[in-house]
Image (tube, rainbow, N blue to C red):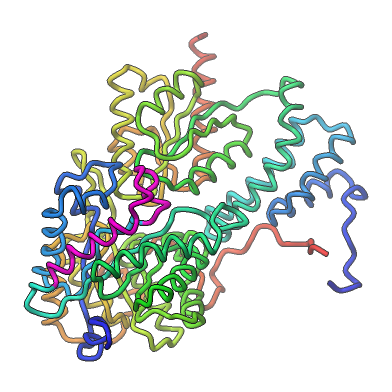
């Protein structure tokens, strides 16, 4: 490292500069710097919810857009999400204490026969980054696992992932079983994975196909806000 | 003694590989979520039928039913101890079919990804990956595979680990990656990156290339990207037969046999030597591909416009290679450097 490069001192930046720097640090996947930034903002009296939305979610939105546009790829996004997680670890208990508003809840898992969890993990991390509560039931899930998680967690959204052409049809098995049990309309079902497309999502009866984690977040926000509006309109 | 693939490559200027494994097995009754590799033992007749259908349609090379036959993938089905055995059987069945074909047919032992992410972002270490690939390689070798065939890889670390493992098994090999994300692999590898990696290996493959990914047109753009790097190594093109569509409980691909025939000759004109299909490519596709390769003359290297005119549009505006003038710019720049 050259001597003329000044070491950045985060605590010397004003709030705006610090948030901008945190956007850069999230983009570069610098976990320790993100943790430091979160702690500085807390010391300056920022509410945990404001740090989450303005600094972390704001920064991850930029990461999500560049992932969507083919500028960042999986390794960079995993690093960014890991940095985000460092900040979330500090904020999570404080958010609960302060009764911060909640975006919604999602149960997510990879379907039976499929061990791929990269896409699922990206979606989980980006959803958490957007303020959602995420319950990850892991890989290789038979329909029973999904039903059990829906029952115990009562989420707003069910997310299913598959990376293989040999496993993607299993999503239909899960949705069909939900229909049989009269549960289908209680949840928003989002699906994703490399071999899927929008038409496939429609054909199996999902509410949406998410091309990538950034789209998943946008769709989830959209559905949850519509649900809230509906609730207000019908008074339920 | 050289292997069957090297001998064929010496005498022929193009070879046809096979089509889909999963799509064909579904049509024979494989249930979604079940391990295709367990059928090597449970339904050897169906696996022989699968292999024979590719040979009868004119394939010079077919891949064994062992794509998910590594310990990490088989663990899902409680069969992680059976990687060697199930891989061996897949190759033995292939040997039977190839040896009765009446011409030279190459049994290529398929090796797919582990599904795990390498450290530091994930749990997979280099030595663990080498160990898993080596175990599968020995099984395929014992079953009589002519060559090993690594496919659908996204991470360069995984490709390198397989190369090392195949060297330990003393087996010649081929290896393709899957370019499905804006013209790159999921891990961001461009076609140019792959050529540089392959040429830097201590144990390089006989041939390298691309399989699966998105549509056939994207795959040919990737092949042109390989060619632009000037590698002398034979190039493999194994593209999907169009886009997956769901119909009455099954996945169908919308690429017609006629379209795949056009794809095959275009792949050869692009500079590919080993040409086959991937997901959705059935025997009827292979038959028309073979006929087209045998009857249609070679033409000049197609342009990107000619590819999209014939096979449909690309899934992304660029593929991360060449002049990056029209590539989107990062929204944040790294202002910080770690000291």
User: Residue B69, image x and y in percent?
Assistant: 33, 56
- The spot of residue A40 in percent (x, y) is 86, 41
Q: Residue furthest right?
A: A12
Image quadrant occupied by the N terminus of chain B: bottom left
Name the magenta segment's main secondary structure: helix
Give the residue drawn at x 10%, y 80%: B103
What is the quadrant of residue B52 in the picture? bottom left
- Residue B26 falls left or right of residue A116: left
Report x, y in % for residue B198. 46, 78
The image quadrant of residue B76 is top left
From the viewer's side, name the closer residue of A192 and B121.
Answer: B121
- Magenta-colored stretch includes residue A206: no
Q: Is residue A229 visible?
A: yes
Q: Residue at x 52, y 66 (%)?
A: B157
Drawn side of residue B312 relative to residue B26, left or right: right
Q: Toward which corner of the image does residue B5 lie, by quadrant?
A: bottom left
Residue at left offset 87%, top offset 50% = A10
Magenta segment:
B70-98
């Amino acid at each position: 490292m050259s001597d003329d490069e000044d070491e950045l001192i985060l605590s010397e930046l004003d709030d705006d500069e610090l948030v901008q720097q945190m956007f850069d640090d999230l983009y570069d996947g610098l976990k320790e710097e993100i943790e430091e930034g979160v702690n500085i903002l807390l010391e300056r009296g920022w509410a945990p919810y404001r740090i989450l939305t303005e600094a972390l979610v704001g920064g991850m939105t930029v990461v999500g857009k560049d992932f969507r546009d083919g500028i960042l790829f999986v390794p960079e996004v995993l690093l960014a999400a890991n940095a985000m997680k460092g900040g979330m670890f500090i904020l999570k208990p404080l958010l609960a204490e302060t009764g911060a508003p909640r975006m919604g809840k999602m149960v997510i898992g990879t379907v039976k026969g499929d061990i791929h969890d990269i896409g699922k993990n990206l979606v989980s991390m980006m959803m958490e980054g957007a303020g959602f509560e995420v319950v990850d039931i892991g890989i290789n899930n038979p329909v029973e696992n999904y039903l059990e998680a829906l029952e115990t967690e009562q989420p707003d959204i069910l997310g299913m992932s598959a990376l293989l052409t040999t496993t993607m049809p299993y999503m239909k098995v899960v949705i069909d079983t939900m229909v049989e049990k009269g549960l289908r309309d209680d949840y928003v079902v989002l699906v994703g994975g490399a071999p899927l497309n929008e038409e496939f999502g429609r054909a199996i009866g999902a509410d949406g196909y998410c091309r990538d984690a950034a789209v998943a977040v946008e769709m989830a926000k959209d559905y949850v806000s519509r649900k809230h509006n509906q609730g207000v309109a019908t008074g339920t | 003694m050289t292997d069957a693939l090297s001998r064929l490559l010496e005498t022929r200027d193009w070879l046809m590989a096979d089509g889909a494994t999963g799509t064909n097995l579904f049509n024979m009754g494989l249930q979604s979520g079940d391990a295709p590799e367990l059928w090597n033992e449970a339904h050897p007749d169906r696996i022989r039928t699968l292999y024979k259908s590719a040979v009868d349609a004119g394939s010079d090379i077919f891949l064994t039913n062992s794509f998910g036959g590594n310990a990490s993938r088989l663990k899902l089905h409680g069969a992680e101890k059976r990687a060697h055995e199930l891989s061996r059987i897949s190759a033995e069945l292939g040997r039977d079919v190839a040896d009765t074909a009446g011409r030279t047919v190459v049994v290529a032992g398929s090796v797919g990804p582990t599904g795990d992410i390498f450290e530091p972002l994930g749990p997979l270490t280099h030595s663990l990956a080498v160990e898993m690939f080596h175990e599968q390689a020995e099984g395929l070798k014992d079953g009589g595979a002519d060559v090993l065939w690594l496919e659908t890889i996204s991470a360069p670390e995984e490709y390198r680990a397989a190369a090392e493992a195949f060297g330990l098994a003393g087996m010649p090999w081929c290896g393709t990656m899957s370019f499905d994300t804006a013209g790159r692999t999921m891990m961001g590898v461009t076609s140019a990156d792959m050529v540089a990696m392959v040429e830097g290996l201590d144990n390089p493959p006989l041939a390298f290339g691309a399989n699966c990914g998105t549509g056939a047109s994207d795959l040919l753009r990737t092949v042109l990207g390989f060619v632009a790097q000037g590698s002398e190594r034979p190039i493999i093109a194994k593209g999907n037969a169009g886009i997956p569509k769901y119909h009455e409980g099954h996945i169908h691909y919308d690429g017609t046999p006629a379209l795949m025939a056009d794809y095959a000759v275009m792949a050869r004109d692009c500079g590919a030597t080993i040409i086959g299909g991937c997901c959705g490519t059935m025997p009827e596709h292979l038959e028309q591909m073979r006929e087209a390769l045998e009857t249609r003359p070679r033409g000049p290297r197609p342009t990107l416009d000619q590819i999209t005119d014939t096979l449909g549009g690309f899934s992304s505006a660029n593929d991360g290679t060449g002049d990056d003038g029209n590539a989107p710019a990062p929204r944040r720049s790294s202002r910080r450097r770690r000291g």
